[in-house]
Amino acid sequence: MPIIYLILLILPAVLIFAAPLRAKVWTAVGIVGAVAVAVCVAAIGVLVEGTPLTLWQGASVAFGVEAITMDRLSALFSIIISLAAVATTIYSRGYLAHYLDKKPATHFSLHYTSLVVLYVSMIGVVTAVGGFCFLFCWEMMTIASFLLIIFDADKRKTVRAALSYLVMMHIGFAALLAGFALLYARTGEATFAALSGYMSAYAPLPLFALFVVGFGMKAGMFPMHSWLPEAHPAAPSHVSSIMSGVMIKTGIYGIIRVAFALPVEFAGSAVMMPAGAIVLALGIVTGLWGIILAALQNDIKRLLAYSSMENIGIILIGVGAALIGKSNGNDTLALCGMAGALLHTINHSFFKSMLFFGAGNIYAQTHSTSCDTFGGLAKSMPVTAILFLLATVAICALPPLNGFVSEFTIYFGLLDGISGGSEVLSSACGLIGLALIGGLAVLTFSKLFGTVFLGAPRTHEVVEASEADTFSLGACAIPAAGILVVGLCPVPVFRLVAKVAAPFVPMSERGLEWFNAHSMSEAMQGVMLTAWLLVAIVVALYLLKRRAQRDRSVRMGATWGCGFTQPTPRMQYTGESFSEGLQSIASSLTKDTGKGEAVDKNEIFPSVHEFEVKHRDKVSRLMNEWWTALLAQINRRVMRLRTGNISRYVSYALLFMLIVAVLSILNLI
Amino acid sequence: MKELFNTILMIAIALLLGGVITRVRSVLSGRRGPSIVQHLHNVALLARKGSVYSPTTSILFRVAPAVYMGSALLALLFIPIGNLDPLLSFRGDVVVFAYLLGLGRLSLVLAAMDTGSSFEGMGASREALYGALVEPALFAVVATLAMVCGYTSFADIFSVARDLDMQMTIVMVLLAYVLVKVYTVEQGRVPVDDPRTHLELTMIHEVMVLDYSGIDMAMIHCANWFKGAALAVLAANAVMLPLCFKWWTVAPLSLLVAVIVGVVESSQARGKLVRNTTYILTVSALAALLLFVAYLLTLNIQIS
């Protein structure tokens, strides 16, 4: 069995290492593409037919049965992962072209090998039935992504972020390992299928908590998110894109697998309901924390990283709602929550990939990711700007694009919970939380797009920037197509996702068919109609306006300076000032540090000042600093033994031998 | 036929609301005031004028008014007046309504950022923040209505008069109160903002559209009226729901919203800008409280 793993690891590595420098990327694209086609064909077959497909089954190394099986959920995740991986690999051609002369060839070989391994291991994670196979793939995924992050290892910040990522992932891994070990010890099997057996025989919530910690760490769930805003800005853009777009979703995948194995009741007390409430609450907190912190960031990639956290929150709200609905027998809430969560997982992988690609294009041209150094990029990089705008509207969940479809599905479930009168309070909490998250997302992304792409250029790098290369833009075609297809034709996509979601939320009375035919289908058609109507009305209004303007004077004139005659681009509203209003109410969530010297009020003619404000996340500071403080303390204690006195060391050795002697006399060793 | 009548009536209300506010303000300050349709003349004049665009702006600036007006118009089509049926309706359309308003907001905010003016950026940032904070209020109101009536589309919620007891009727009136507050925030009226001036006092909505002229400005005005009418009619619907729920009771009542706004504007000054976030959060909290109280009432728990 391990031989297969080794072949999987070594074959791409050999091919990529052997390829000439400029062909390495195409070798990687070839391997990823070939695997992706095979995986997608298998996955589509599974989605259509519905019967799980066992690709491989083998003897175990540890932890019982092992197999690679693709059911509908795995198939859905496999397709998302494959699409994102292909787009990412193609994108890396353009992004890494700038580094070709600067770095040795082995770096590229290692990078591309890691990319292929990351892809293959992610597919492994979502198709493994559990146990050793799953944990092996999980660990491979972590290591591959670690190697990808440290591509720019010359920067100290990158190494630090990557190490913090590695450490946190292994804390999560320890939790997963403990979870699977516990499962194996009690049931003799460590697969996801064995979970429901375990959970109806032993207290389920402790095991559930263990898995939530393990998977939540990967997903960036509050308060375990502190690696996200560090790792994403440090990694190359295509790596952030695949990590944020799909890798963190493997955490969601795990949570779904575990959460829906929970029994409704255990030993007379409700289990699924509190678990659902916990997931819902975690979702609301994660979403709000993510979006508020995102709104305060002034670094494009850091902002996008926090927004990934927000989207994980939205997905968790869906999962929590589904659990609550299932426990109370509310079909609509359960199915809509689950389908909405899955749909949002798909959608987020599209628009977040695209946003990170956009950020990468900008970085490749201007070597900066700080919002306030840009302005007016839409003029020098029009295609990137249009793609970025598309993703911006989609991530704000506004009609007529895909983000709206998935949020609408979750809202639909929550509203049904409220109007049905069965789960009013929990649904209402989810609804109001989601509404606030949605509103703040508009604030965050209008700030991002507005300060980066609109207005007048603030620095000369922006003026000199030119459009990104064909590969970087071409790679965006995959996510762009996804955004438009899901947004404008939501009905078939929803049907497909509902099919995937249905086995997790057994319909109590009326089957999925009834559900599709009556309530949701009609609403989805309504959404589709609204989307097309909106496009039609807007286009019509714009054309009418153009027509009306044809026989009126249309002049160009400078932006009105409010009576000020010499406005400069530096006077534009910056990202920092844009979120100042929110900052004033959310100041208790962050620790703000200012670097530099502010302009003194008494200076009549101010000289040049540099001032930088950073909003640090209080929770992640707390987590990180607490750990480091603890480690430093342990270290200090241990260091007391190391005195540098040779006689001391000799006495340690003697003491050790003495202990060994005593223990062996007592027959203890 | 009923649907078409509903839409026409809705647009008529939209066009009238602004005039009523101005007239009420004039009468209360002892003037005769302009004609009740003066603002329509103004907008017609704007539509006939030429436009000036800043060279800083991109195509987005020119498309934004169309998006703003299109989304507001589409949002309007979901709202029924009393027992009339709206043109568009499906389960869950309350969410579509709110997010269409969100799309309009995003387009104007981005257009304001496109001009590169610090002043417009200021307005944009405020509009985005206040819009985000008032969103929960709108959703809580809608959720309360959905819970009380058991439906999730405006057409079903406001289809027939509901038999509600005294306490629930009070809740309905309070919901209308919250909706009027949402109206003042969304429209940037006193005490959140004072739309009468340019520059000195007006800090939010009008600031964002400073660089628009001609037909673009006319479109933005129309879109504003549509948005306002949708919220005003919702408020009137909520009040009338347990009473005499007919279109001819709701339509005049929605004009009363304009009267209330006019009275508030003549008797009050704009609040301090830094207090706005607190004000809007209070509105949202009140809406959430109403949802909770309505839930307790449906559970038949006596609140003494």
Image (cartoon, rainbow, N blue to C red):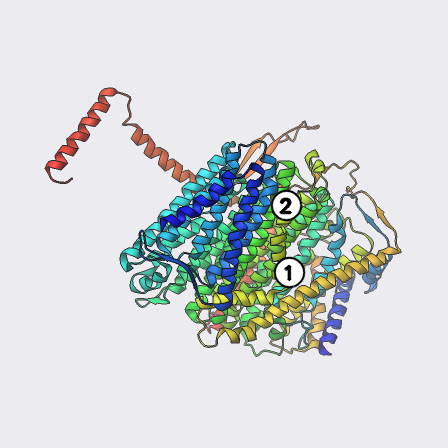
Q: Is residue A158 above or below residue B156?
A: above
Name the residue furthest left. Answer: A665
Q: What residue is at 26 percent from the left and 20 percent from the top?
A: A645
Q: Is residue B289 left or right of residue A564?
A: left
Residue A210 in sight from this viewpoint: yes
Answer with mark 2 or mark 1, whichever residue precedes in sequence.
1
Residue B177 picture quarter: bottom right
To which residue does mark 1 refer?
A399
Residue A411, given in percent of the width and then of the height, sits at 55, 64
Residue B280 in the image: x percent, y percent?
Answer: 60, 55
> Could you tell me which chain the residue with mark 2 belongs to?
A
Q: Is residue A173 above or below residue B190?
A: above
Q: Secondary structure at mark 1?
A: loop
x and y, in percent, of residue A336 in the image: 51, 66
User: What percent of the width, then of the height, locates residue A283?
Assistant: 48, 56
What amino acid is found at the position of numbered circle 1 in the picture? Answer: Pro
Q: Nearer the viewer, mark 2 or mark 1?
A: 2
Nearest the eye: B18 or A531: A531
Query: Which element is circle 2 on?
Result: helix
> Crowding near pointer 2: few (<14 within 10 Å), some, many (20+)?
some
Q: Nearer the viewer, residue A490 or A291?
A: A490
